[in-house]
Image (spheres, rainbow, N blue to C red):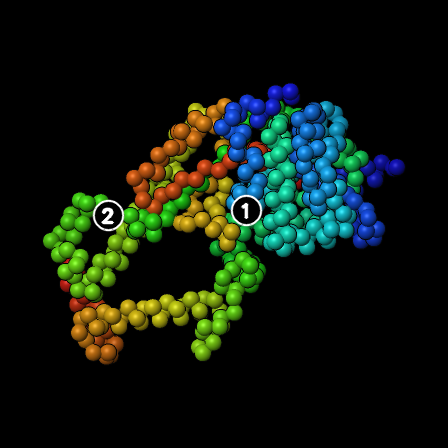
Amino acid sequence: MSDSLAGRMGPAATASPYGGQGSSANLADILERVLDKGVVIAGDIQINLLDIELLTIKLRLLVASVDKAKEMGIDWWEHDPSLSSRARPPQQVSAAPAPTADGEQLAAENAQLRAELAELRAAVGLPKGSARADGDASKTAREEER
Amino acid sequence: MNTEAEAPEAAVAPDDRPDPAATMSYVYAVSRAGTALDTAASRLAGLEDGPLRTVTAKGLAALVSSVPAGAYGEAGIRARLEDLTELAALARTHHAVVEAAYAGTTVLPMRLATVYLDDARVRAMLEERGTDFADALGWLEGHVELGVKVYADPREAAAAPPPAADPPAAEGSAPAPETLSPGRAYLRQRRQERRHHRDAYRAAGAVAGAVPDRVAGLVRARVAHRPQQGELASAAGENIANEAYLVPVEGVEDFHRALTGLADGLPGVRVEITGPWAPYSFATVPAAGGRA
């Protein structure tokens, strides 16, 4: 192989691709390739086969389907602060502790919805009243919209 | 030296080697033996800053560096892969070495953490699998891998100015936005968001479907990867297609040109081309003796 790929790629290609790719390429792209692709041959050092399969699946999940992982009950990255913002201690909701990340999200969404509801009420001129009034208000708004 | 010890499946107990100075051979890639790989090896350091070298047999060369036996034995490797910081460093170094070697010649990149006890074991592996490697190298010769990812980003679609003709047709005789009451404005906004969402996904799906057709005459092979959805897939929007193409070196520019403008005029759709990569996604060799 006296003929080099770099030589045949022309000046435009040799300037950046190989030099820059190593340091700047997206970690997800790199992991996807070095973990999941490439030549798989049996080295002398192997984590036992089941382990490495599990490990590969877990690592693959970092760049692939999180939903699938949750189905399988694997969620270790959610507890790792470097991987998930949701793993941070829930300081701001300590008054109304939410046991799970889901609960926390729901609480936030609830608060947001309440605020929006209040705005709507104010706009339509209804008092901060009953559930009945709420229903009427949104129905009126929907009818107006048509 | 009995024959059993040389069998590829020879089991090695990691805890039997307490010597901290002991090293093992980490394999990055395999190529044809020749000066290109030796040049790459002399320029670069591998993992743990260990110097790279080539191990040759049967006209093939493996790009190798020595790593501490403790840190890269079975327990060490496992701990390393479980830690994202360590894993990232390991992956980036592995990748950098493969890329550098690939700049000079066609290589078969090994999967991360392919470790042998010593160079003699690497040589034995090259001898055993030499034919498969040579075939694969011949097939990949003169080709690079390019990645294509298509994203749908409804928020970007929402941020784009709406087409001028759109609102009157869709809303009938609805008043201009500034005359709407806040409640109606809110509902109207929600409806628009939903429409942007749907449109962005629909358009991205069409773009993803058009990519293989556009590059059909320019590529040798195509592999569909799983869309990136994990915590590491931090790009804006949702990755709805993630593919790799094996492209002749001289066709790389044509490939880029063929996909230029694919997402123009489609707010919320983004096409990303990555690479050239070493042909990770196409470097497959048959399993030895039918074993996994």
Point out the residue furthest to the right here: B1
- What residue is pinned by disc 1? A27
**Residue A113, position as x, y percentages in the image:** 32, 68
**Residue A50, position as x, y percentages in the image:** 66, 50
Q: In screen coordinates, is B117 left or right of A113? A: right
What mark, if any, has residue A2 been given in the picture? none
Between the residue at mark 1 and the residue at mark 2, the CA separation in whole angstroms equals 35 Å
Amino acid type of disc 2? Pro
Q: Between residue B181 and residue B192, name the one nearer to us.
A: B181
Q: Secondary structure at mark 2?
A: loop
**Residue B92, position as x, y percentages in the image:** 60, 44
- Alpha-carbon neighbours of circle 1 within 10 Å: few (<14), some, or many (≥20)? some
Q: Between residue A50 and residue A40, name the one nearer to us.
A: A40
Query: Considering the image in quadrants, where does the C terminus of chain B appear?
Result: top right
Q: Secondary structure at mark 1?
A: helix
Tally the marks: 2
Determine contact: label 1, label 2, CB under 8 Å.
no
Q: Is residue A65 visible?
A: no
**Residue B238, position as x, y percentages in the image:** 41, 49
Q: Quadrant of residue B64?
A: top right
Q: Is residue B146 visible?
A: yes
What chain is tagged by disc 2?
B
Q: Quadrant of residue B112?
A: top right
- What residue is pinned by disc 2? B162
Query: Considering the image in quadrants, where does the N terminus of chain B appear?
Result: top right
Q: In screen coordinates, is B268 left or right of B239? A: left
Going 52% across and 69% down the picture, which residue do you hit?
Answer: A89
Amino acid type of disc 1? Leu
Disc 1 and disc 2 on one polypeptide chain: no
Q: In screen coordinates, is B237 left or right of B192? A: right
